Image: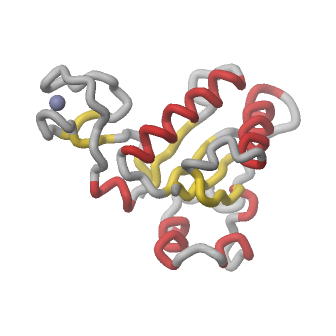
Amino acid sequence: MEVRKLMGLCPECGNLRDALEDRCPFCDCLGGPLPHPELSDQIFVIDLEADMPTVADALERLDRLLRLAQDAGVKMVKVIHGYGSSGKGGLIRAAFREGLLHHRWANRVREYLPGESLKAGSEALHGLSRHHQQRIKDLRGGSQGNPGMTILVLA
Ligand SMILES: [Zn+2]
């Protein structure tokens, strides 16, 4: 299942809260949320194109979201970065893929699968555990073979 909201358990009061908010709305603490067991089976979607950010802003948003996702127990992330030879989508995609090649997120990302390589029976899926393969099969229609997205398997 794909989720866009990252929920974590508050380390102070134990309530389920939005992991993207710094402050807990229940007890007002600033502690980072604890891993939420359900998140490890879900695919967290990060849309880098939302709000049309600059390339630098998009990568910074990704830095932060990957850290929070990892802390919250997420194992698989679907990054939507768009594509094209011109325009912001193309620039974000290029910068993002370059960041992956240069191990910018090496401490968080164990493997990545470009959307264009995600096709049934493809070589790219072969090395993945059965568990991860099943998750990728569960991806929403339109993800398979889509060059505008990349799947990250978190460390
Ligand atoms: Zn709290």
The image shows residue 103, relative to residue 130, as above or below, that is: above
Q: Residue at x 15, y 38 (%)?
A: 15
- Residue at the front extreme, as displayed: 107
Residue 123 placed where, x, y %?
74, 76
What's the residue at 63%, 49% (across, down)? 106
**Relative image position of residue 63 (x, y in whole percent):** 57, 34
Residue extending farthest right: 85
Image coords of residue 53 (percent x, y): 64, 21
Q: Is residue 154 above or below residue 99?
A: below
Query: In the depicted view, which residue is nearer to us: 101 or 38?
Result: 101
Question: Relative to 52, is 75 on the left or the right?
Answer: left
Q: How is the image coloured?
A: secondary structure
- Along the horizontal axis of the image, is 103 left or right of 20? right
Q: Residue at x 29, y 38 (%)?
A: 33
User: In front here: 106 or 123?
Assistant: 106
Q: Is residue 55 left or right of residue 12?
A: right
Name above or below for residue 49 compared with residue 23: below
Q: Quadrant of the N terminus?
A: bottom left
Q: Residue 107, percent across and down?
A: 57, 48
Q: Can you tell me which quadrant of the image ligand 1 is in?
A: top left
73 sits left or right of 12 in the view: right
Which residue is pictured at 52% across the width and 55% down the height? 154
